Amino acid sequence: MKVWILADVARSVPGGMRRHMELHAEGLRRLGHEASLFFSEDFRAGAAVRVPKRLPGIKTLLSLRARHARELPDVVNVHTQCAPAWILAARTGRIRSRVVVMSYAADEGAINLQRPRDLLRWARAALPARSTFPRADGIWCVNTSDLDYYRLRYGVAASKLRCIPHAVNDSFYRENGANERDPRQLLFAGTWITRKGVDVLAPALDLALHEAPELRVVLAGTLVPPEEVRRCLTPRVAERTRIVPTADDQELGRLYRTSSLLLIPSRLEGLPIVMLEAMACGCPALAAANSGMLDVIEPGQNGWLEGSFDPERWARRILELTRSPKALATASQGAMVTAEAFRIESVGRVALDWYASLRAG
């Protein structure tokens, strides 16, 4: 089978989307199939140059139309923002491929309608998606909340929807690393933005460190300068915090294996790859009770869920868990067992079987 995987995101910028795409392609190749990756750097030639940024689907389609005619991929796996143009092209016979929407989360769900301009943002995201997604050949969701959203709000047939998790790189699976783990070290791994819950994290850490000054904090993959992050922290937290703006797999693996607890106070996610990677390394998470965290975490068995965004509540949970070495050890072992389902070949086989069923249908 020949599969194209594309999104209007930069190959040069680290992030969950890029890692998902690369690991999905690797899984297909290991199983003997072809996979081609396309990033925003690949959509800057010819007629596509004149296409506005707010029309990423048309840009990608114009850039790849000639190559598509030559290679004729069986499946085009395309991110939500670009998907409407590809779905329409397939429905009108301009391309001959099955079109699968790659969805991290329903994009319109991230828009809070508070100001007039928010309505315009919602319309740009929701109207093309609602009018085309039911006509896609399939929609790949990474959590069941999104799957239900597309089924109930968009009217997508259940037969077109599939919940498949991200894959995790092999480098994160190895010996437990329990001897390396520092029971005092807390880890946050993600972009330093409000959607990731940093406005909850910063005050929660201040409250926790006030009562337990022996705790230490690592903020990794923030993608913003350390001084910008430190401006959000109290002096008490700042002096006990190490900031790593970018981190490769080797550095992330070391942080997962030396930390006792991963903190994920996100308001909206698809399925955090960092959570799955940390689980493979035996680092359980305390995560907000939403999105893909609900699908993966079994409270007390492989991590914990928190239903509130109250910093005081998060601080109490952090203190409870860091003072419970037995609970952390149990969840660490359970996290590694759970993570076995996210190996590259395992996820690749599930996706490949689904693609085959779409082609047959």
Image: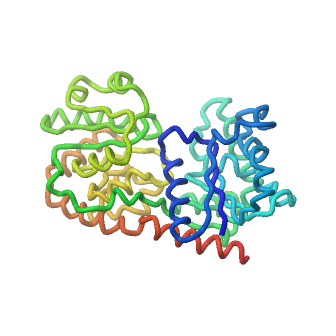
Could you tell me which residue is drawn at 59 percent across and 41 percent down? 9
Q: How many marks?
A: 0
Up-down: is 226 above or below 307?
above
Of the pair 23 and 86, the residue shown nearer to us: 23
Can you see residue 9? yes
Q: Is residue 225 left or right of residue 125?
A: left
Give 268 or 340, whichever is nearer the viewer: 340
Q: Residue at x 56, y 71 (%)?
A: 32
Would residue 335 appear left or right of 2 to someone viewing this image? left
Which residue is nearer to you in this view: 235 or 248? Answer: 248
Q: Coloring scheme of the render? A: rainbow
- Does residue 147 sit above or below 18 in this rendering? below
Q: Residue at 51% x, 60% y: name it.
A: 26
Residue 118: % across, % down? 65, 34
Q: Can residue 152 be spotted in the picture?
A: no
User: Residue 20 location, x and y as percent?
Assistant: 51, 54
Relative to 228, is 244 above or below? below
The residue shown at (16%, 48%) is 183
Q: Is residue 245 left or right of residue 27?
A: left
Q: Quadrant of the C terminus?
A: bottom right
Q: Locate residue 238: give its quadrant.
A: top left
Q: Quadrant of the N terminus?
A: bottom right
The percent position of residue 138, horizontal first and vertical second, equals 67, 65
- Location of residue 82 in the rendering, given as x and y in whole percent from the top left corner: 69, 47
